[in-house]
Amino acid sequence: SGDSPVSGVLYALDPASLANGVYHLRLTASDISGRVTGTETVFDANTASKPGSYRQSDIDLSVNLGGTRVDLVRSYDSLQRDVAGSFGQGWRLANRDSDIQTSVVPTGDESRGSYNPFQQGTRVYLTLPDGRRVGYTFAPEKHTLSGITFYTPAYQADPGVDYRLDSAGAVLIRGPKGFYDAQTGQAYDPSSGQFDGPQYTLTAPDGTAHLLSAANGVEQQVLPGGVRLTFTDDGISSSTGESVQFVRDASGRVSQIIGPDGRRVLYAYDALGNLASFHDTSTQESRRYGYAGSDAHLLILATSPSSQTGNAIDYGATVNAVPVLADLGGPGQFSGTPYHGTLAAGASDLLSFNLRPLEIRSTLKGTVLLGVELRADAGSGLQPAAPSIAGLTPLLQHSGNGSAFALFAVSDAGLGLIRIAGSDAGTAGAYTLQVFVAGDANQDGRVDGLDSALVAQALGSSSGQAAYVRAADVNRDGTINGDDAQLLGGDFGFAAIGPPLAQSSAALTHIDLPASIDLTTLA
């Protein structure tokens, strides 16, 4: 946008920066009198290489349906981060979410049964179960019988696409605007629901047939052995009797998946509709996800506290996934529990942590002051630089003599990324990192009167003196004074969220008489 004279290219679009599909480009202009004019064009973005995109897939649950292993796959694509899938923005259930799109211009009256017809060369885009976004060209087959010419639907796959696409069967005639049903005169658009059979059928190289609709994605899947799986919003059912249950939240996102054997996996979302976490209640495996503050649905961090692995995703001309060495967890885990590591020369180490919404809201100002202290181990030659947290500016920081410290104000719940580096490219060695909530002097996960009393008792003391308590020295400057008391006040009221605690309870019944006990009352 702008009001400067332009002679030449207004804007250059790189199709590699867009998900494969059909796009409408609209240009509008207005004069000083407020008169507006515009023009619109339709174009395809279709490239095999997307160097600036990031894709990730995880198998959340494997089940046996009809004697066949079925993997429930959850996939993320940064180029489709604004598309709502089964697991929130950018995340799709690969087994079902297909996001079918065509180049047919809508009439605006589809709800009344009025559709524009497919034409020779109409483009159809969809997302394959393996995550590839691919295209097909409508190329109906011509037939001549007893001097009568008619057509049947057929598609030509783009180069490199090994799935076959078919659509609802019909005998078609060709009109000036496209193809129509020879019997009814209806415009041929498979998504209209006015033709026999599934709207689309996608056949994999192994013979698995996926029966699709434009609105719902995969509705049925026919496995090579003949077992038929039916997909609905409520789950998956097999023709042999087994089923998988989906539980959805008020926004339609999957919040639980329950397998035929009762195994359960859970999903949680943030206020922006992003997938925040995954948890398998049987294996206790968990994964957490973080997103860019400046781009609400752009995945930048994926961690697994249970396996202490993860990746930080760095976007640019190409995408680089950098390993995260450990997930420190939340305040209930990292308070009083240091992390030990060894920094290589010229390298940086990445660690993640997590703050929950209730923890953020527990302070008076809705902001948690978080300290990050880095110290070289005894005998280590490391000279650390001040640690940093992605997206945050430190309130204060200092470094020197083999140690470094920074204090941050965290106002957004979710994952955070800590970066550890040396003061120069040549320094290296073992270190100890401690993350703490400012003011939690007794390291019990709360900032309350007990902490205030500890700080008050140690006021005026310095490092090396008997009264000095390092955990009460909030800014780690070697002296406990009014500055530390003030910082404690900023976090006063903070309470870390811990795991549920089981409580002993008794229930009475008679022999052979069943009893129902609400387990939610025990934790």
Image: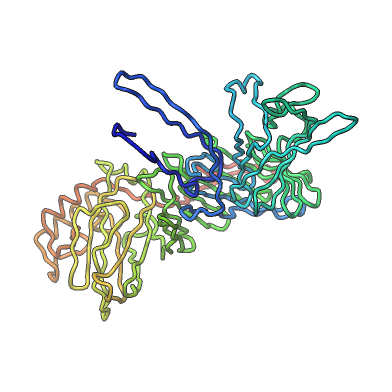
Q: State whether residue 312 is above or below residue 210.
A: below
Compared with residue 344, is residue 409 higher up or lower down, i.e. above or below? above
Using the rendered image of the protein, determine whether residue 522 is visible from the camera's viewpoint. Answer: no
x and y, in percent, of residue 380 in the image: 27, 79
Percent x, y of residue 488: 20, 51
Residue name at image x 63 percent, y 39 percent: 123
**Splitting the image into 4 quarters, where does residue 484 fall?**
bottom left
- Residue 227, visible in the rendered structure: yes
Q: In which quarter of the image is residue 334?
A: bottom left
Q: Observer-nearest residue: 378 or 396?
A: 396
Residue nearest the observer in this picture, 461 or 433: 433
Residue extending farthest to the front is: 7
Seen from the viewer's position, the closer of residues 1 and 499 is 1
Q: Residue, x 13% and y 54% (percent of image)?
A: 483
How are the colours assigned in the image? rainbow
Residue 387: % across, % down: 27, 62
